[in-house]
Image (cartoon, rainbow, N blue to C red):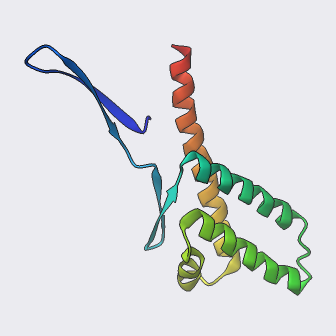
């Protein structure tokens, strides 16, 4: 639910301390045996979503019959993979799954699950506002 937990602790001298344990702000991702982490700090998440929206716009305008544009697609997918999962993530993934359709499908799946997770976390904060 929340990226932290709290405990109220009464010490022997009746002073109370609120302790907050901070959880990681990275979401683990596994593609086959490969393991990555997505940094979901506000800045990184917003940057990634903006970059991904530009990527989607370029994909929609793509002419699949044009081999130069298809080569550009590979470059675009690599950029998005490396921004989301870290530099070198595309090469590692392509080494175990050398098919652009599978690579693109995996990327779409990761993004959908990431957005769902972030929406779920935002929903938990919205519930607090209602109380």
- Write the residue at 80% across / 59% down: 54
* Viewer-nearest residue: 10 or 29: 10
User: Considering only vertical position in the picture, is 84 above or below 34?
Assistant: above
Image quadrant where residue 85 sits = bottom right
- What x and y, as percent, mark residue 55? 78, 63
* Viewer-nearest residue: 57 or 109: 57
Q: How many marks?
A: 0
* Viewer-nearest residue: 84 or 108: 84
In the picture provided, is 80 more to the left or to the right than 71? Answer: left
- What x and y, as percent, mark residue 123? 57, 31
- In this view of the protein, can residue 106 be seen by the observer? no
Image quadrant where residue 67 sits = bottom right
User: Considering only vertical position in the picture, is 73 above or below 44?
Assistant: below
* Viewer-nearest residue: 117 or 85: 85
User: Considering only vertical position in the picture, is 64 above or below 114?
Assistant: below
- Write the residue at 58% across / 51% down: 114
- Write the residue at 55% across / 85% down: 95
- Write the residue at 62% across / 65% down: 83
- What x and y, as percent, mark residue 6? 31, 29
* Quarter of the picture holding the N terminus: top left
- In this view of the protein, can residue 13 be seen by the observer? yes
- What x and y, as percent, mark residue 14? 13, 13
In the picture provided, is 59 more to the left or to the right than 105? Answer: right
In the picture provided, is 3 more to the left or to the right than 101? Answer: left
């Amino acid at each position: 639910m929340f990226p932290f937990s709290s405990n109220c602790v009464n010490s022997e001298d009746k002073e109370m301390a609120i302790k907050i344990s901070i959880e990681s702000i990275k979401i683990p991702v596994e593609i086959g045996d490969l393991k990555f982490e997505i940094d979901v700090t506000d800045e990184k998440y917003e940057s990634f979503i903006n970059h991904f929206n530009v990527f989607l716009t370029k994909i929609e305008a793509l002419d699949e019959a044009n081999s130069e544009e298809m080569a550009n697609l590979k470059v675009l997918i690599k950029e998005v993979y490396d921004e989301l999962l870290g530099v070198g993530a595309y090469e590692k993934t392509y080494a175990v799954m050398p098919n652009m359709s599978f690579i693109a499908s995996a990327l779409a799946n990761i993004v959908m699950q990431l957005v769902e997770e972030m929406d779920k976390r935002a929903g938990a904060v919205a519930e607090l506002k209602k109380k």
